[in-house]
C-alpha cells in the first residue's frame, strides 16, 4: 500500500506516521506539509511546500496512492468563521479535490472531532465548519472516505502538539490520561490507535463512514489488524 499523510508534524500526524512506517503492508509513505518531519526512514518521502492551497504544479507527485490520511487542522480559538473556514474547509478541499481526481481508487481518512455538526446549522462555529468539510468530503468520488471524530486523544510515543496551549494542557494532564482512558474508554483514544485504525479502514473498510472515539478504538483493536 502507498500512503499520503497531510499534517505529519502535528500530534496526531506524528502518531499516524509512526504506525505507517511500522506497518509491513505499507511500502511507501509520502508526507505533505509546510515543514519536514525530521524523521528518517527508507519508506519515507517528504514533499515540503509553503502553499497547501494549490497543487497544479506537483500533481505528478500526488498520483498512484491507495490512501490519504489527512491530519491537518487548526484551533478555532480567536478566529472569525471566515478565517477558520478557509483554513479548515478550504485547505482540506483543495487537497481532496485534487486527490480524488488523480486517485479514484483512494481511501481518504479525515481527522475531524467529536461534536462535529453534520447539519451545518448549529450554534457552534467550529462544529458547523467541520460538518461542512465532512459532508463535502463524503460527496467526492473517492473509493471510500471516512471521518474520524476523536474526543480525547492521548499521545503515546513522544508526539507533541504544535499549539503551545495544547502542549501545556497535555503536560499537566499526562499523569491522569491513562487513568481517564480506563474509566472512559469510549471517549479517549491514543495516537497509536488512531494510526492503526486509519490503516485498518484503508485496508479493509469499515461499516460506518463517520467513526467516533469508540469506533476508532474498536477498529484499532480489530483482529484483522496486523503489523
Image (spheres, rainbow, N blue to C red):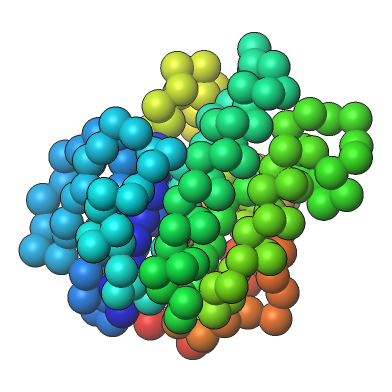
Instruction: Classify the position of the C terminus by image quarter.
Output: bottom left
* Residue 155 screen position, x and y as percent: 45, 43
Q: Is residue 199 above or below residue 167?
A: below
Residue 104 lies left or right of residue 134; in this view the side is: left
Residue 59 lies left or right of residue 164; in this view the side is: left
Q: Residue at x 50, y 56 (%)?
A: 96
Q: Residue 65's quadrant in the figure?
A: bottom left
Q: Is residue 204 above or below residue 74?
A: below
Q: Residue at x 75, y 47 (%)?
A: 131
Residue 73 lies left or right of residue 45; in this view the side is: right
Q: Is residue 198 above or below residue 132?
A: below
Instruction: Classify the position of the N terminus by image quarter.
Output: bottom left
| Camera sees residue 57 | yes
* Residue 168 screen position, x and y as percent: 48, 18
* Residue 159 screen position, x and y as percent: 36, 40
| Camera sees residue 156 | no
Q: Residue at x 56, y 56 (%)?
A: 110
Q: Residue furthest front?
A: 56
Amino acid at each position: 500500500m502507498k500512503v499520503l499523510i497531510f499534517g505529519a508534524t502535528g500530534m496526531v500526524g506524528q502518531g499516524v506516521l509512526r504506525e505507517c512506517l511500522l506497518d509491513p503492508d505499507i511500502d511507501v509513505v509520502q508526507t505533505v506539509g509546510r515543514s519536514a518531519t525530521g524523521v528518517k526512514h527508507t519508506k519515507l518521502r517528504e514533499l515540503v511546500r509553503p502553499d497547501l492551497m494549490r497543487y497544479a504544479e506537483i500533481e505528478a507527485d500526488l498520483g498512484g496512492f491507495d490512501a490519504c490520511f489527512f491530519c491537518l487542522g487548526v484551533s478555532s480559538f480567536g478566529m472569525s468563521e471566515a478565517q477558520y473556514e478557509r483554513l479548515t474547509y478550504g485547505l482540506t478541499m483543495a487537497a481532496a479535490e485534487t486527490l480524488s481526481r488523480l486517485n479514484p481508487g483512494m481511501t481518504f481518512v479525515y481527522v475531524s472531532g467529536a461534536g462535529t455538526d453534520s447539519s451545518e446549522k448549529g450554534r457552534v462555529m467550529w462544529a458547523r465548519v467541520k460538518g461542512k468539510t465532512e459532508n463535502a468530503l463524503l460527496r467526492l468520488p473517492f473509493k471510500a472516505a471516512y471521518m474520524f471524530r476523536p474526543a480525547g486523544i492521548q499521545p503515546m510515543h513522544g508526539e507533541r502538539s504544535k499549539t503551545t496551549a495544547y502542549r501545556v494542557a497535555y503536560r499537566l494532564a499526562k499523569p491522569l490520561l491513562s487513568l481517564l482512558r480506563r474509566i472512559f474508554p469510549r471517549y479517549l483514544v491514543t495516537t497509536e490507535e488512531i494510526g492503526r485504525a486509519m490503516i485498518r479502514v484503508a485496508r479493509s473498510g469499515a461499516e460506518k463512514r463517520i467513526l467516533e472515539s469508540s469506533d476508532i478504538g474498536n477498529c484499532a483493536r480489530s483482529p484483522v489488524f496486523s503489523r
